[in-house]
Structures are given as structure tokens and as C-alpha cells.
Image: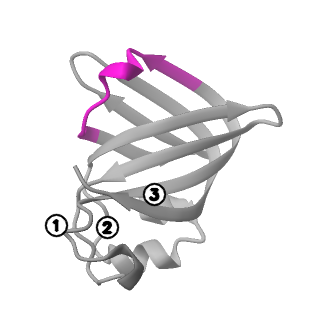
């Protein structure tokens, strides 16, 4: 996923081996101008400590990766309220980034031309 995102230097520094495929899509927004926002939640421990976040497992155990997308081609969502951490695929097909999430109760399919990293936030569950 990280290699599909522009301005990904920070993400590469905290996840040098990449992000596992068990994530949660916590937010999807689509706006005029063919833009979208996507927040990806991961329970993967970062490879390095970020002082302002505190200590993994004590102050936070989820990292939210906030992305902006452009050239939205397709959005399909079924039962978004049933979203949980689960297998999510990110792939580049031709000029599109395709994000697919599926569990028994929820499905998400996004086709986006480009994704740009904005920031990370954290929380504990």
C-alpha cells in the first residue's frame, strides 16, 4: 500500500517492511472536483517511536493513515457500519489504485487515480 501513495517518506520510515493487509477503512469521503479522502486504520506497531504519539500499547495501539485521493473512478460500499479490521487489498491496475475490502457483512471497492499521504493520528482501543 505504501508504495502506491505519494509523499510516502514518513510512512516508509515507520513501516519499512510495509503495512500488513489486515486494516480497517475508518472513513471515506467523496467530494465535488473528483476528490476523496480515505482513512486507513492499522494495528501494526511502528518500527520507530514517535515521541508525540507516546508509547505503543500504553498511549496508542492504532495508527490512522489519512490519505487524499483524486480522479475518483468508482466507489462501492455495502454495510459500512459493519466495518472491522480485516483483509484489504491495494493494487495498481493501469492508471488506477484499487482498494478492495470484504468481510461477511461489509464490502468496499474504490478505484482512485492517485493517493497522497496527509498525516497520521493515533488512538487506543
How far separated are the C-alphas under marks 3 and 1?
18 Å
What is the image's colouring?
Answer: one colour
Depth check, mark 2 against mark 3: the one in front is: 3
Q: Are the two marked residues, 1 and 2, in contact with CB atoms closer than 8 angstroms?
A: no
Q: Residue shown at 26%/33% (left/top)? A: 84
Report the residue marked by disc 2: 18
Q: Give the SS element for disc 1.
A: loop
- Residue 88 x %, y %: 31, 40
* Marked residue nearer the N-terminal end (1 or 2): 2
Q: Which residue extends farthest left?
A: 57
Report the residue marked by disc 1: 57
Q: Are the two marked residues, 2 and 3, in contact with CB atoms closer than 8 angstroms?
A: no
- Residue 108 x %, y %: 42, 26
Asked if the magenta segment contains residue 79, the reply would be yes
Label at residue 119: none
How far separated are the C-alphas under marks 2 and 3?
13 Å
Report the residue marked by disc 3: 65
The span picked out in magenta is 75-87
Q: Residue shown at 37%/21% (left/top)? A: 81
As displayed, is residue 87 above or below residue 114? above
Q: Residue shown at 77%/36% (left/top)? A: 34
Q: Is residue 24 left or right of residue 37?
A: left
As displayed, is residue 19 above or below residue 75? below
Amino acid at each position: 500500500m505504501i508504495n502506491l501513495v505519494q509523499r510516502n517518506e514518513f510512512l516508509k520510515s515507520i513501516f519499512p517492511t510495509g503495512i500488513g493487509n489486515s486494516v480497517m477503512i475508518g472513513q471515506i469521503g467523496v467530494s465535488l472536483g473528483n476528490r476523496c479522502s480515505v482513512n486507513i486504520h492499522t494495528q501494526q506497531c511502528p518500527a520507530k517511536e514517535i515521541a508525540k504519539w507516546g508509547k505503543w500499547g500504553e498511549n496508542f495501539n492504532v495508527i490512522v493513515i489519512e490519505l487524499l485521493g483524486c480522479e475518483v473512478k468508482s466507489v462501492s460500499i455495502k454495510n459500512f457500519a459493519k466495518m472491522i479490521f480485516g483483509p484489504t487489498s491495494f493494487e495498481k491496475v493501469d492508471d488506477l489504485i484499487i482498494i478492495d475490502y470484504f468481510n461477511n457483512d461489509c464490502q468496499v471497492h474504490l478505484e482512485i487515480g492517485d493517493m497522497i499521504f496527509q498525516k497520521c493520528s493515533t488512538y487506543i482501543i
